[in-house]
Image: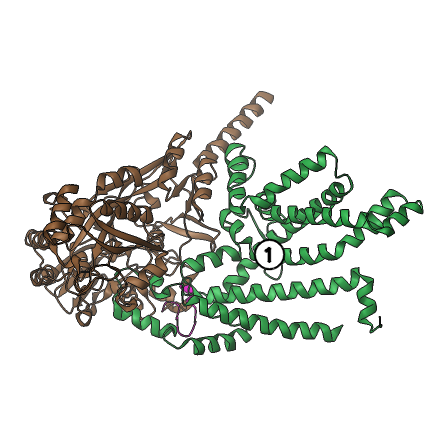
Amino acid sequence: MRKAFTALAVAAVVAASGGLAEAKTLKWGFQTDTTSLDPHAHNVTFTLGFLGNIYEGLVRRDADLKFEPGLATKWENLEPTRWRFHLRKGVKFHNGNDFNADDVLFSYERTNNEDANLRGRVVGIKEVVKVDDYTVDFITEKPNPIIYYEWDTWFIMDKEWSEEKGATTPTNTSTGVESYAAHHENGTGAFTITERQTDVKTVLVPFKDWWDKPQHNLTEVIMTPIGQDATRVAALLSGEVDMVYPVPVQDIKRVNSNDGTSVLVGPELRTIFLFFDTFRDELLYSNVKGKNPFKELKVRQAVYHAIDIEAIKKKIMRGLSDPSAIMISPKLFDKSEGFTRLPYDRSKAKALLAEAGYPDGFETRMDCPNDRYVNDEQICQAIVSMLAKVGIKSSLVAQPKAKYFAAINPKGGSDYAFGLLGWTPGSFDSWNVLFNLLNTPKPDEGRGPYNYSGYSNARVDELTDMIGVETDKAKRDAMIEEAFKISTSEVATVPLHQQALAWGKRDNIELKQRADNQFRFYYVNVK
Amino acid sequence: MVAFILRRLAQSILVMLVVGLVAFFMFQFLGDPVNQMVGVDTPIAEREALRERLGLNDPLIIRFGKFVVNAAQLEFGLSYQHKSPVTDLLLERLPATIELSMVSAVIAFALALPAGVYTGLYRNRWSSKAMLTLSLVGISVPTFLIGILFIYLFAVVLGWLPSFGRGDVVTLPGGWTTGLLTTSGLKAIILPALTLGLFTLTLIMRLIRAEMLEVLRTDYIKFARARGLTNRAVNFGHALKNTLVPVITVTGLLLGNLIAFAIITESVFQWPGMGRLFLQSIQEVDLPVMSAYLVMISFLFVVLNLVVDILYYVVDPRLRVEGHGGGH
């Protein structure tokens, strides 16, 4: 009897501990909290990445950023201006409601609102037509081959829930009426929120009725914002959290040398580059009067040749950058191998300056942010000293992003001679780069708003328009290549590198690192 | 007395108006809030529309006028970044900040009082000198460095205490949250409270010591000793009590400092208080949050000053006599 009882007790303990081993919690620390839970209100990469665990779009990107079906199972371009999306059947929202075409139409209306910062996701759409409960047509003003390229982060909300709870629009910035959706969620995604304390922690659990087959083994995710770099790293080292990012480059060694933690690095999509004032007749902050040296191709080439990109990679980025010859990440453009950087060659740079009429160089000023990109100010310091060695002596003005972006903006008077900028195309497509950064600035057409160089080439503009409506990929890529070849040979900008992502994690966590820095819990396995 | 308090409160309104005005002028130099709100590829026309809707194109004086009118009704608008009412954001974080400041004030005062008296009475002892040397660290090492050193030692190396956060909190009736009722909450407050309180501790301790040295030299202490009073009665009843006027002044102001300058400690320890919110709002140029916070802190300082003045009456009988209109 007693033996039997002991056996029973042992069995109970084993069962209990077995039950405990089943609980897989992921504790995750990031720099900031999600701005709010409203999927349409904020165009913030982190917020959209976080909400991507809770909400879903019509399309989805996999771990390699390739498109895969999301809430739509397939999509087709029926006519140049008509896209048809076939919706997935049997999808449930977290509150149990069914997903159908009405939710897509509703989400379109909600996003096409002046308080939705994501309005750009649905710009250029003339009409959304419900064909049947599971088929939706998007009719565009102009042919748009990349209509869905940003729709992995254009999330679909439940119409009934939003109407019932008072969340049919995002929070109104004029009247101050807050949206229910800012603090509550009802998505279709793999995880659902069970507890949320703003800025303190958010607890998520897997959604039982998710339409897709889970690849993760999590039972719970706890997200904690940890703002200070040192504290975030300490929390990982002490084991209080399982995964943190970003890990500052100078702490990577420390995390790797610690037992049980390591850093996962990978290339990011953002391209860091230099722009020059090539539009003023007289350069600002310069000793050259009456003309603008940067208007000369040879001067821009000299700057390019003067930059020792490998030294920047080694000394400043500690190996964590990929020098770039083109204004878009090679991950996003298939023909990027055909481009090479102008070699680092100081004597060539000096010769070019002399040919351009500046044998002794000239003086100017460099503008730089100091809290926007990885080691941005240090990169600028290095560039200033590299340029000084070939005769271009510049002072450096490095300031916080809020001030910097206001100053270099045309509204702020385009107050610069040359400076540093980073760009990730939101659509992950070259058209975005060409249109925003390399097209002739024409405010009335919305063209070239961030072309701070003031670069202008009619052929590039023309190619950009053709790329915008070309649906054949091979033809399109050839045109993109031509446009990049022209702007690169004319040194419209000097691309520097793509910075790297650094995610710190405990060794028992398996995950997939996406190059867009978005963290999807449904790839995580805790061992 | 009542007239005095009313006068002080009236003055406080003036102080807050001035703080608000200065803050508003400073905001002009912080950069563009719109740029922090929208995505990088947002068209310029859309940015302009947002600017207009936020009222950022109005002249400064009109914006300030609107702010004052709304602030008088305790209405501080929506945070640009969070798109939530600023009042809610601040109130949500108020308990964490107050709790942290109070705990560090209690720690600081409880340690500083005996240490100050001890080093004042036995100033030649080896232990007194050790304490004074150690207190130099508290005065000279910046708070964030102390915080990071604490985290490294107690969280990473020893693993005794958490490196960030407030632990589990309990919500009391009235919406006040407290971490002082849970084990994890108590563990979490130790490091930030020590970090925040260290400067105050050393300052008060050195002040009490200096005052004690001063008072112990006076004639009435000599008389007291001559009368054969016990050491305890002399040291605590007569000497310590007479050191308290300057100590109260400084402590009162330091209490304000503890709340206002919890910013750094909060950000190092990821303490979910108002200071962190303020720091974020500076980075994002979230003007409504910044102005509300500054006005609130200035109100706090005014109130603390008032309390300090009232305490003078309690501690120092000479002031009470003058207060009743007695002549010289």
Q: Position of residue A163 (x, y in %)?
A: 38, 69
Q: Which residue is mark 1?
A: B257
Question: Does the image show residue B177?
Answer: no
Which residue is at 65% across, 46% downward? B202
Q: Position of residue B47 (x, y in %)?
A: 30, 68
Q: Position of residue A377 (x, y in %)?
A: 33, 49
Q: Amino acid at mark 1?
A: Asn
Q: Which chain is green?
A: B
What predominant SS class does the magenta segment belong to?
A: loop
Q: Nearer the viewer, residue B106 or A26?
A: B106
Which residue is at 62% across, 57% downward? B172
Q: Nearer the viewer, residue A524 or B277?
A: B277
Q: Is residue A421 left or right of residue B133?
A: left
Q: Which residues are magenta?
A: A169-181
Identify the colour scheme used: by chain
Q: Is residue B52 above or below residue B265?
A: below
Q: Colour of chain A?
A: brown
Q: Is residue B127 left or right of residue B290?
A: right
